Image (spheres, rainbow, N blue to C red):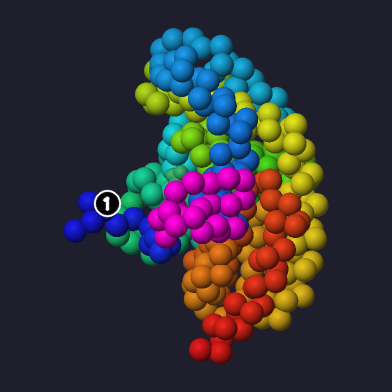
Amino acid sequence: MDALLKTYKRLPVELERGEGVYVFDSAGRRYLDLYAGHAVTSTGHCHPRVVRAIQDQAAKLIFYSNAAGLRLREQAASLLIRHAPRGLTQVLFANSGAEANENALKMARRHTGRTEVVAMAGGFHGRTAGAMSVTGIEKYRRPSAPLLPGVTFVPFGDLAAAEAAVSDRTAAVILEPIQSMAGVKTAPAEYFAGLRKLCDRSGALLIYDEVQTGIGRTGTMFFAGRDGVLPDLVTLAKGIASGVPLSAVLVSAPVAEKIGYGEFGTTFGAGPLAMAALKATLETIEDERLLENVTRTSLGLTERLARIPGVIEVRGLGFLLGLKVAADAAKVQEELFRRGVIVGTADEPGVLRLLPPLTLKPHDAEPFVDILGPAIEAVTAR
Ligand SMILES: Cc1ncc(COP(=O)(O)O)c(C=O)c1O
C-alpha cells in the first residue's frame, strides 16, 4: 500500500528536477510546464536568484519564529506592502491559502463583531473547516458537512443576489475575483464596484482571495485595485515565494489598528527561508519585468489559441487562462502530457487551465500551440 494518503490524482510521472518553464522526469524526459504545480512556481522552476537566496539564508538561520526580530522579515514585508494596493498597509504571514483565508475571515469577525459571511457559488477557498465553509463547490463541501453556519452563497457576478444577501449581520463578502477552479470565470468591473458599495453601506468587509490571481498572475501585481476597487483584506499564497510554503493576508489600516498581540499568528509564518524566497520572488518580478511579460505573452497566446479548431473559448486574464475545448478536458490533458506538455483541468467539464510560470515567453509556448489542435483531434477521433 502507498504510504502517502490519497490527495490529488497524480500525473503518471516521477519528477526529478525543474528548470525555468520545464520539468524533467527520472528518465530525463522534458515537459513544458504550463501548470506550475498549481500556479505556484511563479518565477519558473529553480530560478537562480531564488535558489541563491534560499541557500544563503539556509546557511545563516533556517528558522526562528516571530518571537524575535529579523531584518529580512521586515524587508520582505515592506517590499510586499510597497507593491500592495492602496490602503492595505500591513501583512500577516501564514503557510497556506486555506490558512490565509481562515485568518481573513477571523479578522472580519473580529473587526465587525458579526459572524455571517456572503460567499460565491463556484468559489474555492481551501480545505480547512473555515475555508471550506465559504467554498461554493458542493463536491468539496459534502464530505465535511455540516460546516460553519451563517454562510450564504450567491451566484458569482449577480449583484442583485449579493444585494439581497448582504445585511447588517454580514461580517464579510469573500470571493475569488477570477474563479479558477470553477473554470476561470470573472465578472465585469461594475460588479466589483457594486460589491464594494454594498460592503460600505452594510459595514461588511470585502475580502479578495487572490491566492491564484495575486503576485502577478493576471499581469498586474494584484487584481485588487483594478478599476479603482480596493478590498479591505487580500489573501495570497501559491506563487508568493516561488514554491516555498508561504501565505499572507494584506490588511487595511482600520482592521489592523484593532488587532492586538496574541490574537493572530502561527509558528512557521514568516520563517526566514520563506522570507528569503518572497523577497527574491518580488525582486525577480520587478527586475525581469515579468508583469509586462505576462500581459504581452498572454495577449499573443490567447489570440493564437482562440483560432485553433476545437478551442471553443479562451477565458481569463494574463497567465490564468481557461480553454473550453470540444472534447473531454481530462483526456486532452492526458494526450498533451503524452506529447510533453503539462496543463490543468477545472471543475467545469471541457475546461483546461493554463497557469504557467510568469517567465513563460512566446517561443516557449510554441510547441503547445502546435500540438493542442492535434491533441483535441486525437481525443475526439477515439
Ligand atoms: C483561490 C484559492 N484559494 C485558496 C486555496 C487554498 O490554498 P492552499 O491549497 O494553499 O490551502 C486555493 C488552492 O487551490 C485556491 O485556488
Q: Which residues are magenta?
A: 13-32
Residues 126 and 20: in front is: 20
Q: Position of residue 58 (x, y in %)?
A: 46, 21
Residue picked out by circle 1: 4
Q: Quadrant of residue 202?
A: top right
Q: Does the magenta segment cover residue 16?
A: yes
- Residue 128 drawn in magenta: no
Residue occupying image coordinates x 68% and y 33%: 284
Q: Is residue 343 visible?
A: no
Give the residue at x 49% y 55%: 28
Q: Amino acid at mark 1?
A: Leu
Left or right of 350 on screen, residue 300: right
Q: Nearer the viewer, residue 326 or 348?
A: 326
Pinpoint residue 191: horizontal percent, then vertical percent.
Answer: 70, 54
Query: Would you say residue 294 is visible in this rendering?
Result: yes
- Circle 1 SS class: loop
Judge by depth and name the residue closer to the eye, 110 or 285.
285
114 to 308, vertically: above or below: above
